[in-house]
Amino acid sequence: MNTETDIENLKLGVQETLDELFSERLIPFELTAYKVKADGLGEYVVPFYDSRIRSVRFSWKEGGSVKAAVRAAVLDHVNKMSGPLKCFGIASFTP
């Protein structure tokens, strides 16, 4: 996956997954995937402009589920966070 179109489609899939996680209340705040960077064979990084989560890294191979890969990576990252999470729009959050 090298073309700009492929990366853009991947970014759309990542954002859709992030939106679903937030709407399902599985993450305490909205995140925006402004870009997706390839970081080796089948490895990707999504940087966020957010002080609570700076980025997430996931592995994905064509033919596999982008949503499942992103979902697992984001939930794993959020579950490892310590301290109070600043939730905007959610009264309380329990991962």
Image (cartoon, rainbow, N blue to C red):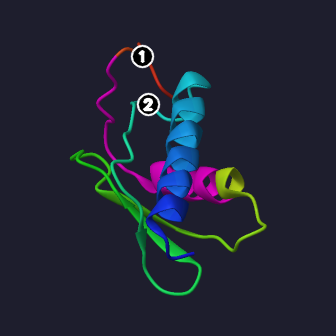
Query: Pointer 2: what residue?
Result: 28
Residue 95 position, x and y percent, is 55, 37
Residue 77 image offset from top left, x and y in percent = 47, 56
The span from disc 2 to disc 1 (Cα, nearest Å) is 7 Å
Pointer 1 residue: 90
Check contact, mark 2 vs mark 1: CB within 8 A: yes
Q: Residue at x 48, y 86 (%)?
A: 40
Q: Does residue 85 appear left or right of residue 72 in this picture? A: left
Q: Is residue 84 rendered magenta in the image?
A: yes
Height in image: 11 above or below 92? below
Above or below — where is 9 with respect to 2? above
* Mark 2 Cα-neighbour bin, 10 Å: few <14, some 14–19, many ≥20: many
Q: Residue at x 41, y 61 (%)?
A: 36
Q: Is 31 located above or below residue 61 in the figure? A: above
What's the magenta region? 69-88
The residue lying at 59 percent from left, 79 percent from top is 42
Q: Judge left or right: residue 17 versus residue 30.
A: right
Q: Which residue in the rendered view is the most extreme toward the right? A: 63
Main SS, magenta region, reads helix
Residue 52, given in percent of the width and then of the height, sits at 28, 46
Toward the viewer: 33 or 54? 33
Tell me the quarter of the image containing the N terminus.
bottom right
Judging from the image, what secondary structure is the residue with disc 1 in?
loop
Packing grade of label 1 (10 A; few <14, some 14-19, many >=20) is few
